[in-house]
Image: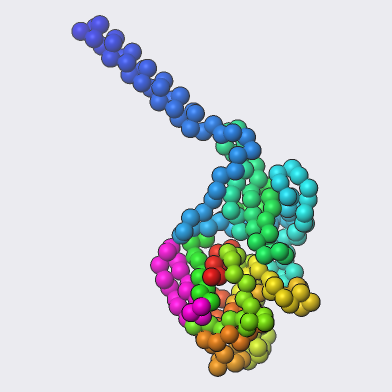
């Protein structure tokens, strides 16, 4: 009986040692490896803590500097698409999409320069159907017809994110109660203020909804604009197709 117990004890010890070695190897990474982040129902946003430098590659050339506050007075945020890890799988850099020209520009920021959060929301814009769909956790919360850009001033296609929320002082004006600023820019209005940024906003011309009549922005009914401003967090992905 004693011999049997000794054998069982030895087998259990060996099994534990093997399990430990597997667990240890599972947390070993190749330094400098990038791991993609996000899914169809979850995205990540990085908020600048004090200031941040965006690099072309980790430790490479600085391509842009960002303050904590954006040009319109809100927090500076980036959409996170991946993370670069060290040999212990600790995050050292975030690979982020930047709110600058050209559309879809990206870079790398130090992990200590930002605060990471997740968002479970998403906006889809169907240009052909002129329709916006807002989703939370993969479920449709809201659908609305929209006005899009004309042939001369098209709404840019691509995957972007909500970089800011702006309330207007004149709800009866051309932007209605306000809008959500996207990380994209008009491909043609290069001389406009701030480089021609694209937004989702209200309107003083409700007859334009459902038509291609804007300068590239996505117009929604004012009631919808108020609701989106209340429920859409910064960093929400926006897919325009």
110 displayed left or right of 136: right
**At 58% across and 64% down in the image, what residue appears?**
159
How many numbered discs, if any? 0
Where is residue 16 shown, x and y percent of the image? Answer: 38, 22
Q: How is the image coloured?
A: rainbow
| Most foreground residue, 153 or 140 | 153
Q: Is residue 41 magenta?
A: no
> Toward which corner of the image does residue 84 lie, by quadrant?
top right
Residue 91: image x %, image y %?
A: 61, 42
The foreground one among 112 and 96 is 96
Q: Residue furthest front?
A: 151
Residue 177 visible = no
Horizontally, is 224 left or right of 3 in the view?
right
Q: Is residue 131 magenta?
A: yes
Judged by its main secondary structure, the magenta piece is: strand
Q: Quadrant of residue 17?
A: top left
Name the residue: 79% across, 77% down: 191
Quadrant (top left/top right/bottom left/bottom right) for the N terminus: top left
Q: Measuring from the top left, give residue 36's x and y in whole percent.
A: 55, 48
Q: Is residue 61 above or below residue 216?
A: above
Instruction: Please name the residue shown 48% across and 61% down the image.
Output: 120
Q: Is residue 163 left or right of residue 240?
A: right
Which one is in front, 149 or 83?
Answer: 149
Residue ranking furthest to the left = 1
| Up/down of 219 relative to 33, above or below | below
Q: Is residue 82 visible?
A: yes
Q: Position of residue 111 (x, y in %)?
A: 66, 47
Residue drawn at x 48%, y 72% as measured from the top left: 134
User: Which region of the structure is painted magenta?
Assistant: 128-144
């Amino acid at each position: 009986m004693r011999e049997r117990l000794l054998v069982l004890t030895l087998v259990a010890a060996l099994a534990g040692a093997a399990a430990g070695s597997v667990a240890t190897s599972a947390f070993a990474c190749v330094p400098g490896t990038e791991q993609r982040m996000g899914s169809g129902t979850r995205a990540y946003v990085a908020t600048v803590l004090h200031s941040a430098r965006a690099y072309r590659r980790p430790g490479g050339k600085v391509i842009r500097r960002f303050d904590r506050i954006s040009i319109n007075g809100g927090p500076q945020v980036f959409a996170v698409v991946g993370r670069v890890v060290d040999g212990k799988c600790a995050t050292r850099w975030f690979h982020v999409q930047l709110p600058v020209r050209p559309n879809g520009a990206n870079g790398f920021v130090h992990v200590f320069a930002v605060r990471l959060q997740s968002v479970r929301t998403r906006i889809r814009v169907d240009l052909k159907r002129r329709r916006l769909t807002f989703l939370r956790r993969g479920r449709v919360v809201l659908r609305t017809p929209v006005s899009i850009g004309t042939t001369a001033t098209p709404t840019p296609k691509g995957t972007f994110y909500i970089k800011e929320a702006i309330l207007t002082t004149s709800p009866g004006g051309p932007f209605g109660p306000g809008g959500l600023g996207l990380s994209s820019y008009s491909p043609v209005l290069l001389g406009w203020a701030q480089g021609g940024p694209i937004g989702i906003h209200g309107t003083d011309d409700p007859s334009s909804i459902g038509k291609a009549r804007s300068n590239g922005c996505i117009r929604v009914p004012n009631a919808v604009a108020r609701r989106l401003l209340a429920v859409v967090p910064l960093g929400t992905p926006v897919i325009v197709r």
